[in-house]
């Protein structure tokens, strides 16, 4: 069974508060146009895992993903899977020039060895909260004191419910399509990783910023109408080549039961050099 596939990249967030996904802002920083979100590229790289392992990946799968080069809306790409075995595979997302734009290691957790995150009694972000500007001082404060918890509702109306312009290109497990066998509408990788992006940007005002790298572990498939509680902590801060970086840990829980859903480590540039 081949797990390779081709597609056209889809910018799910052209109107995002992070205007690196808009043509105007992205061109100011030397890009050809708005960047397809890193979380969307991540969904392409993990799609073979959903196709191969099914719900087991959504319940206990993991991925390590690096974004290497920008990908633009409607650009053709190939996902090429190599060295597949019972436990993991490697994959590359390759554009139509042959450039590897993103790569991943993806697999299934053996089970008992993975440490499940513990619910923290973080303060829930109030409605209308206006965060401080993203500065080294702001993130140092969050590192010391912890972030504010945010909540997101997974549903078929959510903007991240599809990561292709045509949702039929997604595995049936991830689709809200009553006509398709095995259609369950479980949350996809682009939503899971977006939760980390959203809580990150909600705790500190930044525009634009760039998602670079993630490592995540699933603990349970996220069903429709789940209210997801998202908690963030800052692990490291550094500067490189004029860019300001932050490494954060984000844990997702079912808000109703406090059961863990996923844990995400993320590296991002929160302030691009001028």
Image: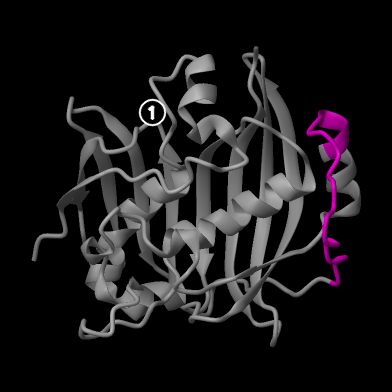
Membership of 161 in magenta stretch: no
- Residue 94 position, x and y percent, is 23, 36
- Residue 123 position, x and y percent, is 88, 65
Could you tell whether 53 is left or right of 15 in the image? left
Membership of 137 in magenta stretch: yes
Q: Residue at x 20, y 85 (%)?
A: 181
Q: Residue at x 49, y 80 (%)?
A: 224
Could you tell whether 230 is left or right of 214 in the image? right
Q: Is residue 203 visible?
A: yes
Could you tell whether 237 is left or right of 192 in the image? right
Mark 1, Cα crowd under 10 Å, few <14 / some 14-19 / many 20+, is: some
Q: Is residue 155 above or below residue 70?
A: below
Q: Is residue 86 visible?
A: no
Could you tell whether 121 is left or right of 177 in the image? right
Region of the chain picked out in magenta, as a range: 121-138
Label the magenta part by its dominant secondary structure: loop
* Circle 1 SS class: loop
- Residue 55 position, x and y percent, is 35, 79
* Image quadrant where one finds the N terminus: bottom left
Which residue corresponds to mark 1? 69
Q: Residue at x 39, y 77 (%)?
A: 185
According to the image, what is the colour scheme of the structure? one colour
- Residue 225 position, x and y percent, is 55, 81
* Image quadrant where one finds the C terminus: top right
């Amino acid at each position: 069974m081949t797990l390779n596939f081709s597609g056209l990249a889809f910018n799910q967030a052209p109107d995002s508060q992070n205007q690196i996904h808009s043509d105007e802002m992205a061109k100011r920083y030397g890009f050809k146009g708005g960047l397809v979100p890193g979380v969307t590229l991540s969904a392409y790289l993990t799609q073979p895992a959903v196709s191969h392992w099914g719900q087991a990946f959504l319940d206990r799968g993991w991925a390590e993903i690096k974004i290497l080069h920008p990908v633009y809306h409607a650009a053709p790409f190939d996902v090429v899977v190599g060295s597949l075995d019972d436990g993991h595979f490697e994959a590359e997302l390759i554009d139509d020039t042959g450039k590897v734009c993103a790569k991943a290691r993806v697999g299934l957790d053996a089970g008992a060895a993975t440490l499940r995150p513990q619910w923290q009694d973080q303060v829930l972000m109030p409605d209308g909260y206006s965060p401080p500007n993203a500065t080294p001082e702001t993130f140092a404060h969050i590192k010391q004191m912890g972030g504010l918890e945010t909540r997101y509702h997974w549903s078929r109306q959510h903007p991240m419910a599809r990561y292709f312009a045509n949702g039929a290109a997604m595995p049936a497990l991830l689709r809200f399509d009553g006509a398709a066998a095995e259609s369950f509408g479980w949350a996809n990788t682009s939503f899971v990783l977006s939760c980390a992006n959203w809580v990150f940007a909600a705790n500190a005002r930044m525009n634009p910023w760039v998602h670079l790298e993630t490592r995540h572990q699933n603990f349970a498939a996220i069903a429709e109408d789940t209210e997801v509680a998202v908690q963030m902590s800052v692990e490291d801060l550094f500067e490189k080549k004029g860019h300001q970086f932050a490494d954060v840990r984000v844990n997702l829980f079912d808000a109703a039961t406090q059961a863990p859903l996923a844990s995400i480590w993320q590296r991002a540039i929160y302030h691009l050099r001028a």
